[in-house]
Amino acid sequence: MIEELGTNDQGDMIINVGPQHPSTHGVLHLVITLHGETVKKVEPHLGYIHRSIEKMSESLSYRQFSYVTSRMDYLSSHINNHACALTVEKGLQIEIPGRAQYIRVILDELTRIASHQLWWGALAMDLGAFTPFFYSFREREMINEIMEETCGARLTMNYIVPGGVMFDIHPDFQKKVKHFLKEFKSKIHEYNELVTGNVIFQNRTKGVGYISKENAISYGMTGPSGRGSGFICDVRKLHPYEMYNQLQFDEITEEGGDAFARYMVRIREMEQSMNIIEQLIDNIPEGDFLAKTKAVLKLPKGDYYTRVETARGEFGVYIISEGGTTPYRIKYRSPGFSNLSALNDMSVGGKLGDLMATMGTLDLVIPDIDR
Amino acid sequence: MTNEELKMKLEELFPGSTFEEETQWLTLNMEAEGFKPVAQQLRNNESFNFDFLFCLTAVDWKTHFSAVYHLTSTALRHTIVIKVKIDKNDPAVDTVSDIWRTAEFHEREAYDLMGISFTGHPDLRRLFLEDDHVGFPLRKDYEDPINMIKL
């Protein structure tokens, strides 16, 4: 039940933020109990974009089900597809060609950069600065063009399929990615000059939305949000998939636990992602991009769980198979869902204006939460 | 700890534990009754220290339900899966939201979509669907001709 709006018997004011609010970036509905301007309770109301993807997937074949996952966390659609493909490959013990592995990892990291860029612009906009949004979209457009050429889509890629990738990369792919890396390297200091070092921005994020490491683990906060509290949880390091264990990159953690720490993790992660792409882009092996698979895929009876690192945190695909052509039960462990559950704990005692900074640095994507 | 050590330790503490064979992680099967003390042990016992519940879900097996808990220890780096068998006619199991905070949302989701009630949960309401929604969509016998979710 949504509480009656107005005031309660203790004189606290109850207000709604969302479902149509620019700071929620989607249809998130928060019912907030305020004492003056101090937050006493934040209660998320979900389901405005619930599509029952898990139930739907029970009637989709193992080739089809990954397509709907692009519609969950639409900023990490490559990585979601990747997790689904990995699960099916694990069940059928398909070896995928080296070329496909390289392409997958490069695209995963490009996706991560694009997602962080959008988050960076949107966060600044939430806090009242409009210019950064245009800066981030300027560079993000370059990634979108690379995606468009190679995958044929800008948002819902559906390019990674069980066995490899759907078709080969565009002839200009390597050239364009290298051009992007060169450009973005020279631009990232602009991001820091414009926002990171800005006094107003620092005052609005430092010490805001604090969560301790113990609580972050207890709430299951993963990804940059968890790492901002010092929780070592990068799936690429802990449970390497594809060839992440052969790559040189650092897991970024910050000890602050506040909004600024989470911000810094994402900024530094973009540099690490560029680092990963640089190691791979010149070495993409020749050969097949798709392994030969049977026309109809049937996973042997059993449980299959895959963990990957999306731009928002640990994404899990849990398939229970009874040996048929469709999954018996699918569960998607979405990072945003767990991260959101900590929002109340992080906001209580703070001011209403600070809630936007807390929410912004959690990097919530609502379709990922509602599924 | 390795899976073998975990298994031995669990058998020592909870005699009569049954494990699944050939699984990705060590999988412990148990009944809903007596689950809560095991969960508390897994979290608080120094040698287990399972502090990160990374997935909680429920499955409809037609004859019974099961709740599946994926746990890992961030300090000791071992992982375990617990499958709790739940009665079909009276689907209830003790909450673990006081042990792992993330369970608060995950249990609400399982209640909303599968209709399992978690005894002792502080705020067990529907999470995604409307409060007056009839039925639990993830159950295998669920039919809804108006809001069709089968393709």
Image (tube, helix red, strand yellow):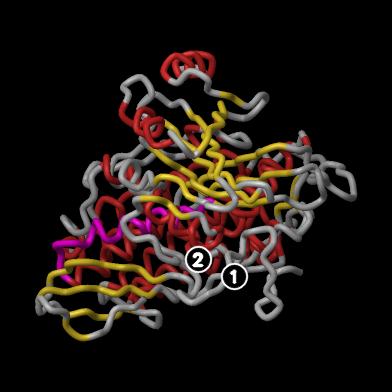
Residue that lies at the very extreme toward the right in this rendered image: A295
> Of B100 and A291, which appears nearest the observer?
B100
Q: Secondary structure at mark 2?
A: helix
- Expressed as whole percent of the image width and height from the top left, the position of residue A30 reads 33, 73
Q: Is residue A157 left or right of residue A210?
A: right
Label 1, label 2: how far apart the Cα atoms are: 8 Å
> Of B138 and A80, which appears nearest the observer?
B138
Q: How many marks?
A: 2
Residue A8 in which image quadrant: bottom left
- Expressed as whole percent of the image width and height from the top left, the position of residue A360 reads 33, 65
> Of B83 and B14, which appears nearest the observer?
B14
Q: Which residue type does callout 2 highlight?
A: Asp
Q: Is residue B117 left or right of residue A227?
A: right
Which residue: 37% across, 49% down?
A: B102
Residue A51 is marked as 1
Q: Where A306 sits versus B72, above or below? A: below
Asked whether residue A142 is drawn in magenta, I would say no
User: Can see residue A70?
Assistant: no
Write the start and end of the magenta stretch as one range. A333-351
Q: Secondary structure at mark 1?
A: loop
Which tag, 1 or 2, sits closer to the chain's start? 1
Q: Where A3 sits versus A193, above or below? A: below
Which residue: 48% across, 77% down?
A: B132
Q: Quadrant of the C terminus of chain A?
A: bottom right
- Expressed as whole percent of the image width and height from the top left, the position of residue A206 reads 17, 57
Q: Which residue type does callout 1 highlight?
A: Arg
Q: Where A217 sits versus A199, above or below? A: above
Residue A370 is marked as 2
Residue that lies at the very extreme toward the front in this rendered image: B89
